[in-house]
Structures are given as C-alpha cells and as structure tokens.
Image (cartoon, rainbow, N blue to C red):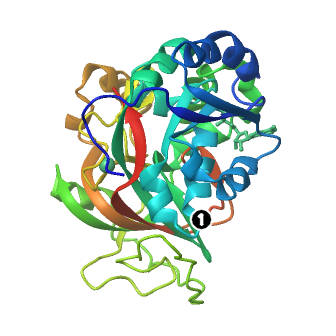
Amino acid sequence: LDRAYGASQRQKRIKVLVNPFGGKGTAQKLYVREIEPIFAAARCEIDAERTKYRGHAVELVENLETAAFDVIACCSGDGVAHEVFNGLAKKKDAARALTQTAVVQLPCGSGNAMSLNLNGTDSPSLAALAVVKGLRTPLDLVSITQGDKRTISFLSQSVGIVAESDLGTEHLRWLGSARFTYGFLVRLIGKTLYPADIALHVEIDNKPGIREAYSHETSQAPPTHDPRVIPPPTDGLPSLKYGTVNDALPESWTLVPHDTLGNFYAGNMAYMSPDANFFPASLPSDGCLDLIRIAGDIPRLMAVKSLLAIEKGTFFDMPHVNYAKVSAYRIIPRNQAHGYISIDGERVPFEPFQAEVHRGLGTVLSR
Ligand code: ADP
Ligand code: MG
C-alpha cells in the first residue's frame, strides 16, 4: 500500500473522533453541521465516536482495527491528533499502521495548526472538503524520550514563553485562539528566562556564531541527572539512532549552556497559529525539525517587534533569534522546580528530554 501523489482516493473509509471538550466546546455541533454532510456527500464510509476523557483517543486507536479505515479524522484541536499518532505508535505493527492510516484534523479546537498546514484552512467545512480531496503524504514524526517514556510528537516542542502561553492559559479557553496571544504578551512583560543546556544534531544553522550570545563566563556545569537506563518499548517503531535522554550524550554532540534563553521552539510544520507562519522553511518530510532559539534578556520593545517581524518575514534576521534545522537534540532545563514544556500543545513534566526525527514515518492527507 504505497503512498502516492496521484489521484485522490474516492469514498474514503473514515474513523471520526470528536472531542466535545476541544476549543469552545462546539466540536460536536461543528461536526454535525459542517463536516459530516460533506463526508456524506462524497459517499465516504463514516464511523464516528466521541472521546470521553484525556488519553481516550490513544486507547481507542491502539485497539482499532486500522486496516478497516483509510483515515482517522480528529474533530478537535491538535491534541487529539497527537493522541492518535501515539495510539498508532503503540500498536504492535506501529510502523505499518502509521504508513497505512492517514491522520487528519478538522479544526474544532483552539489550536488547529495541523489543519492550517495541511488543509490550508481553519474552517471546518473547507477542511472536510480538503480531506475528501486529499492525497496521502508522508509526515516526519519525532520520538521524544523523557524519564523512562517514549512518545511521539508530530507538530512542535517548546520550552519557555511559547509553551507557557499555550499551557498557562487553559482557564481562558473561552477566548478561543486569542488566549495564546494574550498569554504571550503577559509573559513578554515579565522577561522570563529559561536557562538550559542544549545539544543539537544540526543539519543547517543560519548563524552558528550566535550560540555564544546565550552563554556567559558564569555558566555552571550542567546538572547530573538520574542515570537509570530503561529501554523504552520499541515494538514496531524504528529504533533510536541517538539513544534516549538517559543514555550518555552521543559523541559528536556538545552540551552548550544557554543561560539567557527565553524560548526554545522546534516545529515540524510552518503554521503554529492562523497569523504566525513561524517556520516558513519547514517541509513535511525533510527529516528535520526547524528550531528557533530566542534570547530572553532582550528589551521589551524588541520582544514586541519580534512578534511583528514574524508576520513581516524579517524575524530570522533579528540578532537575538537563532534558527537551525536539526534532526535530533537534547535539552536539559536548569531550574527544575517550575516551568512549562509543551509537546504538540500538551503539557509534559519540566524535565530533560531528547528528540529524534523519523523521516516520513507518519501519513497525513494534503492538498
Ligand atoms: P484544544 O485545541 O482546544 O486544546 P484539543 O482537541 O487539542 O482541543 O483537546 C484538548 C484536550 O482535551 C486533549 O488533551 C484531549 O486529550 C482532551 N480530551 C479529549 N476528550 C475529552 C473529554 N471528553 N473530556 C475532557 N478532555 C478531553
Ligand atoms: Mg520536517
């Protein structure tokens, strides 16, 4: 069952997962009014189900007979798509299931980056049309090891202000996607620093020299952390070329202190929100993550200018912004008492983690 760029498959068999909790809580209504009629008109075979709790989609998909479906469609934000990829990854024949089953998102949440990137819209009905017409396309997936766990990320990883603006604003769901902008502005004014030690497996770096800007003479030795080596379950998934976060650092990597880091943001797709083409050079299966590091000790006016520069496309030229394409990395945050790490918009413990890209391991539909 090869992935092709030819004609779109007709009458797709679609497993629909609706998250009644996503976004402003209107996913079920949006599904019935805007999405289902388009699937039905295209004579797709539909099997719809609601998610009942956080993590439910992982269980459902892990136990789903995936051969019976061409597509798993998430009427949700990016969170349920994240769970679906992880459900597929937990199957005994994970690599095969990830190749056979296309994962799509119909924008019914507050974070709808996947739909913006692949369906080209955050309108549920236009996204449904894009899914009907969509072509199977490989997508890079990323293994994240943290503690003794291995999980899959398909969209982004962030440490610092971006993660905080996403995760620290859960109580503002009623604002829709504006809660991210609000959260970002509030935190910008606080000039929060996120000191960390970072090792990258760099493919392309736009300003290799800028690394020094983050480190000062006063830099402390990186903390030693739990040396337990627990091999994560790898059944069906590709093995880890660079080991886990608990292994010794690969020989060719160097831990670089980032004392004044404000933001660490790695993305697998271009759009992170409707008005932020944050990673314009990212490609769905280039085997790379696009990584942005932003110094946190910059004047507030400069920080606000950076926000505007994202829209103007001049962001990468700013002196406090470093951009690189990486295929793997490790990040060890320093003040481990508090802080936010977001993986695809979901909160994980504020602890060291390592990421490694698996080129084209996942399958999506795109225009
Ligand atoms: P949003 O973009 O608004 O965050 P998501 O679809 O990403 O919307 O979902 C947010 C979270 O809701 C996900 O972590 C998901 O696991 C969780 N979730 C799914 N179904 C339910 C439910 N029935 N009740 C509560 N949480 C749920
Ligand atoms: Mg990529």
**Could you tell whether 357 is left or right of 88 in the image?**
left
- The residue that appears at 68% across and 64% down in the rendered structure is 337
Secondary structure beneath label 1: loop
- The residue that appears at 45% across and 51% down in the rendered structure is 100
Residue 194, compared with residue 238, is above or below; it is above
Residue 333 in view of the camera: no
In front here: 54 or 196?
54
Residue 33, compared with residue 114, is above or below; it is above
Residue 223, compared with residue 177, is above or below; it is below
Residue 318, compared with residue 325, is above or below; it is above
**Quadrant of residue 173 in the image?**
top right
- The residue that appears at 51% across and 64% down in the rendered structure is 94
Q: Position of residue 280 (x, y in %)?
A: 27, 33
Quadrant showing the C terminus: top left
Q: Position of residue 152 (x, y in %)?
A: 52, 59
In front here: 282 or 123?
123
Q: Position of residue 50 (x, y in %)?
A: 77, 34
- Identify residue type, mark 1: Lys
Mark 1 neighbour density, 10 Å: few (under 14) some (14–19) many (20 or more): many
> Hey, which residue is sitting farthest right in the picture?
52
In front here: 225 or 105?
105
**Could you tell whether 142 is left or right of 178 in the image?**
left
